[in-house]
Image (cartoon, coloured by chain):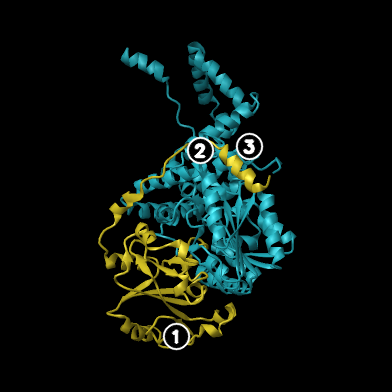
Amino acid sequence: MGAREKILSRIKEGVAPAVSLPDMSITDNWNSDIDVNVLKLVLESVGGEIHILDSVADVDSKLKELFPDIKMAYTNIEGVGFGNVNLDEVKMAHDLAKLEIAVLEGEFAVEENGSVFVSDNKMGNKMIPTITEYLVLVVSKDEIVKNMHEAYKRIDLKNIEYGVFISGPSKTADIESTLVFGAHGAKNLALLLV
Amino acid sequence: MGTEKLISHADHSRNFLSNQLKASWFNKSIWYQRDKRDVATKKLDEWETLRQLASDIKAHSLSKLDEYLIEFEKNATANGIQIHWAEDDKEHNKIATDILKNHGAKKIVKSKSMLSEECELNHHLEANNIEIIESDLGERILQFSGEKPSHIVMPAIHKTKEEIGELFEEKLNTKPSNDPVYLTQAARLHLRDKFINAHASMSGVNFAIAETGSFVLCTNEGNADLGMTANSKLHIASMGIEKIIPKQEHLGVFIRMLARNATGQPITTYTSHFTKPDEGAEIHIIIVDNNRTKLLGEEKFNSALKCIRCAACMNTCPVFKNSGGHSYNFVIPGPIGAILAPVHDIKKYADMPFASTLCGSCTNVCPVKINIHEQLYDWRQVISQKKSAFTFKGMIMKGAAFVLENTWIYDTSGKMGMFFIKHFRWLVTHATPWGEGRELPDIPKESFKDWYKKNHS
């Protein structure tokens, strides 16, 4: 008998009491109208910034205002002419190690924790959201959910290779509990609501 | 595991407390975590309902663990993930090493995994000439200093910035500094080089979802994500059998609680879901037992397997705060460690359930409602019964029972005790372990019984 069978048969001998799965519909009670201000405050509290724009057409000019002088940027959002990195020329991590800015489309934002869900089909390359120094996420104003219960109703993990909720810039407090931004991932994060 | 004589929790604690300045600094930094947790959890009106949901989902999963593991295996395999099973730490390490060797992988980046610490994976890989780099900043610091984690969320919480500054000077050629921003930046540059040159990556698993065959990793640094995506064409994730939850919809409950209860953040910076490997890449998951099924067979103790490793129980524990994580000999310290350890080796870890005041604060903050302090008490009963009846404590207890059963002896010994303390006070405070660090109160002129007789009869 291999490890698999031995482990499974020992689990059967276990004596964990039978408990039925709880009714998850109770989580519906915690949904309510979205308040963009709450999202803003939470995102700022985790080190991110938020800019509210009139439309996608304003993204380009906002980016030029935020980043007047950059050498390496990537974007895959249609109509945003900001990027200059061609992923066809990127063969390995070394090629992206100096990436300064990535502008990606987020699927939706979560009011309660300032996170934005980004899935692999919007990343260009899976390493882009973490390897870039500055991450800009563009999300529609209509695509904000209240909390993580609502968030998981929007996703189907079966159809995603890799998907990540990103809440603010990368951080660590491993040195004497002092919060420092830019551990391994992006040092800065901006959410553009359009 | 051997049953070699270990330094006891009490002796470790005495050493820890001998540096009063550092002990007080540590106490404050742990309480700071507890404080942030309180602020975050009180912002959610539904917190207590979430705890009940989390507890029920985990309890249910444990009751059908075999079915959910099989469902997870089926779905993950269909997604192209390769599943392995390991009965214990040795088998886990062998499987991981074999996979790495088959791929010719010599340089590995790993994100924090308490299971890999439990299995002492790093030693095993190094013995096989495989370079393993811890990519979590706290873990990397400890890899430099040759120490074990003292906390499961903040592994290097026991080290001061001055100590880390000196360590980095030696290992990373940094200039003399104790500035956390400068030191973190130095580590970022050092580890970035490791990420983009790694042959493979490794991690633990925070949650595994039976319904979809996906696994979830929660980090603040982004090291798990960068490790898996930067250069690695091979990833190995190690998970204990208890990490399974049935459905995607259940994730919402745990993700809402984990970071709030751990560090007071509304969510970790990265909450990452992995379902399928890249084209041409491989993901392997090693499902590990290592005494977990043994714990599942312990009626009073199996609910400890509900733990999601938030560390709130250690952050709130008065004993942990005043003894440090290294005072516990098990890989997981604090209250949850003290109820997980005995099943691994009841002799080796016999003193751990006694390293508690049984105040119950751990139980109150636990997000999955494990009755930690009751289990600590119950483990004490099991351990005491296993020990010889002729221990010093056992004899004292028998003596106490004899005295308490006889009114005359009780009264007389009470009076004798008062006389003794009054006239040989120095002996009581200096010649007994009880007197260490304690002041003796003034002795009243008469006993309560005498006073009551005089005034109320």
Q: Which residue is mark 1?
A: A83
Q: Is residue A65 above or below residue B101?
A: below
Q: Residue at x 60, y 25 (%)?
A: B394
Residue B346's tag is 3
Marks 2 and 3: CB-CB under 8 Å? Answer: no
Residue A139 quadrant: bottom left
| Chain painted cyan | B
Residue A160, compared with residue A77, is above or below; it is above
The color chain A is rendered in: yellow
The N terminus of chain B appears in which quarter of the rendering?
top right
For residue B69, say whether it is visible.
yes
Secondary structure type for disc 2: loop
Quarter of the picture holding the C terminus of chain B: top left
Badge 1 amino acid = Gly
Alpha carbon of mark 3 to alpha carbon of mark 1: how far? 60 Å
Q: Chain of mark 3?
A: B
